[in-house]
Each structure stands twice: as C-alpha cells, then as structure tokens.
Image (spheres, rainbow, N blue to C red):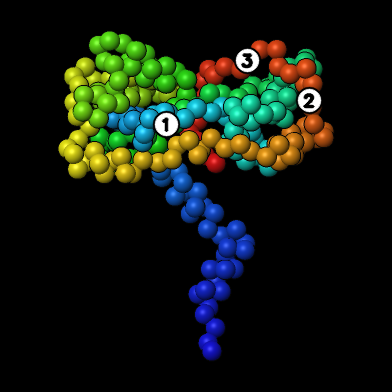
C-alpha cells in the first residue's frame, strides 16, 4: 500500500505546531474588528431567557519573558482564587517602579462580549468591548427614549464611532440610532439567531496551577501571594487592545 505523503505532511505540521496560526485566525474571524469611523451594528438578544445578551469577564494582559503577549481570564470572575490578582496586589506593595509598571500591565480589566449583526456585511460577529463603550450601551437601554435596543422588532441599531487619539481609539460619540427598526426580515432574523456565537463559553475558568506558572515566569518566584486578599475591587479603565487567545 502506498504511503499517503500528504497525510504524513499534515501530521508532521501538526506535531510541529503547524496549523496554530490558522486556528487562531479562525477564532479571531468570529470577532468584529471595529473599523475607524462610523459603524452600524445591531446588538442581538440572548438566545433565550436563561442567557443574557452579554457575557462579562476580566482580562489579565501578560507579556511574557519571550516578548509575546497573551490574555488570561481572571479566575475571580468565577469566585475562585487568582494568582495573577495576588501578584497584581503584591507588586504594589514593593514600592519599586518596575513592579508598579508590571502591575499596571497585568491589572485585570473588564471585558464584555455581545453578538452583533454587522450592518455592512450582514454577518453575525462577536463584539468585544471595554467598560467605557459598554456603559454607553447600558445607558441607552436604561433611557426611556430607547429601551431594549436588542429587541428584534422594535430595537435600535447602534453606531460605534471609532476615533483615534494617538495610538488609542476613542468611542465618545457612539450612540444608538434615534429611530427604531426591525433587525431584519423574519428569515434574516431567524438566520441571525441561529448563527449566535456562544459568548458565555468564552469566559473560561482557567487552571490555578497554570496561572501559578505564569506568575513564576514573570517574577522568577514560585508565587507572590496576598494571603489577606485584595482590599479593593479592581475596575476597568482603558483596556483597548483586541481580544486574542
């Protein structure tokens, strides 16, 4: 029987890490990459009453000794101990500038995921936003002039206006469209709701021991803990980097 060289080549690439870039690209393609300027989207509701239209997490953004940056979901979102949070608070206690710089880098920052209908392409994508833009969305839904903007029949499209200020994007002018409108025809709405991404599965409970290894790689120490726990909540301020696992 002849050897299937193509199958062997694929297996060789897999064993050597081949295909990782493609898989990561497929994952990122699910997300809405916000272009600069004005962009109309329709925020979609949850698939049923048991699912919120958004999923909430906090992200530690860690640049390792190899220079590569990776995002880690904070375990405290699940009510579990988080070695990266322990490191964050511990770094502030040393009084060293380099430790303060590292603390600012790994600070857990709020992140919110929503399914949206891209009005430009018609595709259902995952919108990943920080607390500033999410507050605008929630404020609109609490405003009696808008109400539930995710309503498929009488909701409102949302205009995300992205302006660059140096290297950072700003979304200050973002707002729902004043006039309500259906999300689409019955067929389009059915198709969109069938295409919802499982945003809640993105909020992973990561392994405690794995996070201790990350801390060890950052500090050269087995762990830097805060046995008394944090004395204040960690809030988001300016997480403006795109999601990448």
> Disc 1 versus disc 2: distance between alpha carbons?
37 Å
Q: Nearer the viewer, mark 3 or mark 1?
A: 1
In the image, residue 242 sits, relative to residue 102, either above or below, namely: below
Left or right: residue 200 versus residue 125 is right
Q: Quadrant of residue 163?
A: top left
Residue 36 image position (x, y, % from top left): 35, 29
> Disc 3 versus disc 1: distance between alpha carbons?
27 Å
| For the residues bearing labels 3 and 1, Cβ distance under 8 angstroms | no
- Label annotation for residue 211: none
Q: Which of the image's four quarters has the N terminus?
A: bottom right
Residue furthest to the front in view is 49
* Mark 3 crowd level (few <14, some 14–19, many ≥20, 10 Å Cα): few
Residue furthest to the right in view is 221
Residue 37 image position (x, y, % from top left): 31, 27
| Residue depicted at x 20% and y 21% | 180
Q: Judging from the image, what secondary structure is the residue with disc 3 in? A: loop
Left or right: residue 64 versus residue 45 is right
Residue 100 image position (x, y, % from top left): 70, 19
| Residue depicted at x 48% and y 54% | 22
> Disc 2 versus disc 3: distance between alpha carbons?
16 Å
Q: Nearer the viewer, residue 27 or 190?
A: 190
| For the residues bearing labels 2 and 3, Cβ distance under 8 angstroms | no
- Label annotation for residue 50: 1
Q: Nearer the viewer, residue 199 or 4?
A: 199
Question: Mark 1 or 2 closer to N-term?
Answer: 1
What residue does disc 3 label?
Answer: 233
């Amino acid at each position: 029987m002849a050897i299937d060289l193509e199958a062997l080549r694929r297996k060789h690439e897999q064993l050597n890490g081949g295909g990782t870039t493609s898989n990561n690209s497929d994952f990122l393609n699910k997300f809405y990459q916000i272009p600069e300027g004005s962009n109309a989207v329709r925020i979609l509701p949850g698939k049923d009453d048991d699912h919120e239209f958004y999923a909430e997490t906090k992200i530690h953004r860690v640049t390792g000794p190899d220079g590569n940056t990776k995002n880690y979901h904070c375990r405290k979102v699940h009510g579990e101990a988080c070695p990266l949070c322990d490191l964050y608070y511990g770094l502030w206690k040393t009084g060293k500038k380099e430790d303060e710089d590292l603390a600012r880098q790994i600070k857990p920052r709020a992140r919110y995921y929503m399914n949206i209908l891209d009005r430009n392409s018609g595709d259902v994508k995952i919108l990943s936003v920080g607390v500033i833009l999410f507050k605008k969305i929630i404020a609109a839904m609490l405003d009696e002039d808008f109400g539930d903007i995710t309503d498929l029949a009488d909701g409102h499209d949302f205009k995300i206006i992205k302006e660059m200020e140096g290297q950072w994007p700003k979304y200050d002018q973002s707002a729902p469209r004043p006039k309500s409108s259906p999300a689409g025809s019955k067929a389009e709405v059915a198709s969109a709701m069938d295409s919802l991404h499982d945003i809640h599965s993105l909020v992973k409970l990561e392994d405690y021991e794995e996070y201790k290894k990350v801390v060890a790689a950052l500090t050269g120490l087995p762990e830097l803990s805060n046995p008394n726990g944090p004395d204040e909540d960690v809030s988001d301020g300016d997480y403006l980097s795109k999601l990448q696992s």
